[in-house]
Amino acid sequence: MSTQVHANLTETQVEQISDDLGEPEWLLETRKDALAALDELDMPDVIRTPGRTWTNLDALDYESLVDPLDYAQDKDRIDAEGVEVLSWSEALDDHADLVKEHFGSVVDPQRDYLTALSTALFSAGTVVYVPEGVDAEDVKIRTTMNSQSLFNYTLVLAEESSSVTILERQGTGETVDDDQYYSGVVEVVAEENAYVQYGALQNLSEETYNFQVKRGHADTYATVNWIDGNIGSRLTKSNVETRLLGDSSESQILGAFFGHEDQHFDIASRVWHEAEHTIADLVTRGVLDDDARSVYEGVQDVGREAWDTSSYQRENTLMLSDDSEADASPKLIINNHDTEASHSATVGQVDAEDMFYMTSRGVDPESAKNMLVEGFFVPVLEEVEVDELREDLDQLIYERLRQ
């Protein structure tokens, strides 16, 4: 186990956070149980490729990164007609039974050390409640971290035959002198015939260590789609996951990252096919420059009862420097023969022939490279249904190329 962050945590601090948010006793006990479990929990699994472990979460000095009672933030929430986008306290006041039913039902509060830490300490909470039959777009959540550490939690409940698209932005406002730590947990519950697209764009300061888990459950005929954009942070450990629990449920996981200097990305996508006629598509594209590093793992897990399954995965990383490093570990776990599944992963540099073609027609080398990189991201950007997210991500890529 690493340096124990809970050496400077107490039940009194957890009680104060819970009291500040006006939480019921059952939730306080859930926090306390998570705090007590830290002694027995391991760090989250990191991605390993043959001969190498890429990410060392145990090496981080969490005790110096986390101040439990300092959680300054700005939080903007913009709802859409028929949808309730509530602060944590509002959600507990208005929908206490729904919160109790679904909190921790998708992401186990004690799944690993860092998730349990988030459960004990989260202070920035949002609940998105989409009632039955509501069709809504342009729900927006913006979190700006103004403290050394911040623990964020989001619950999305889409009831039967509802639809919602959500854009979440994470950024840094006031900077601090030391390193920072951000933790985000997202749970999505999509009931029968519901549709959820959750797009997240992380642009935290590059002095931030970033840990995130996004996980959804899709019922019969339901769809849970994810967009996971990572531009900021010093180190990102991101897990995006969907369990396809109902017949004819679907999920798409789109990922995009762009690292430079000494940024490090550990990106994992996973889909469990647990019912008949389920469909999944995992697409990730990343670019690395300078000394940046990335490792990606995509897992398509097809269960014994998952008849007539379609599952596809593609990951591509483009290297802009000789000092950047990347690897990928796509995996298929197939326990049902009635399955169409494939995976692919590539790591490579800007194509010399493409560069020659463009420069021979009068495009200067720097502009040619930038145009090729922007074009490299197009297959992901074209799949993004949230216009504002697509435009924001495209703009951040443009700015990164010209730094």
Image (cartoon, helix red, strand yellow):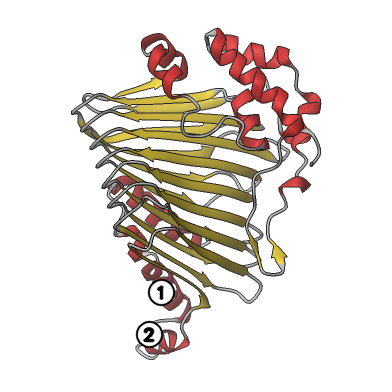
Task: Decide if residue 180 is on the left or right side of residue 199.
Answer: right
Expressed as whole percent of the image width and height from the top left, the position of residue 339 reads: 34, 62
The answer to whether residue 175 of the structure is visible from this angle is no
**Viewer-nearest residue: 237 or 102:** 102
Task: Decide if residue 301 is on the left or right side of residue 275.
Answer: right
Expressed as whole percent of the image width and height from the top left, the position of residue 27 reads: 55, 15
The answer to whether residue 26 of the structure is visible from this angle is yes
Q: Quadrant of residue 382?
A: bottom left
Tell which tag, 1 or 2, sits nearer the viewer: 1
Expressed as whole percent of the image width and height from the top left, the position of residue 22 reads: 52, 9
Disc assigned to residue 372: 1
- Looking at numbered disc 1 in the image, what kind of residue is underneath it? Leu
Disc assigned to residue 358: 2
**Viewer-nearest residue: 359 or 39:** 39
Note whether 401 is above or below 271 in the view shown: below
Which SS class for mark 2?
helix
Residue sitting at x 46%, y 40%: 215
- Looking at numbered disc 2 in the image, what kind of residue is underneath it? Met
**Viewer-nearest residue: 283 or 66:** 283
User: How far apart are labels 1 and 2 at the CA level?
Assistant: 10 Å
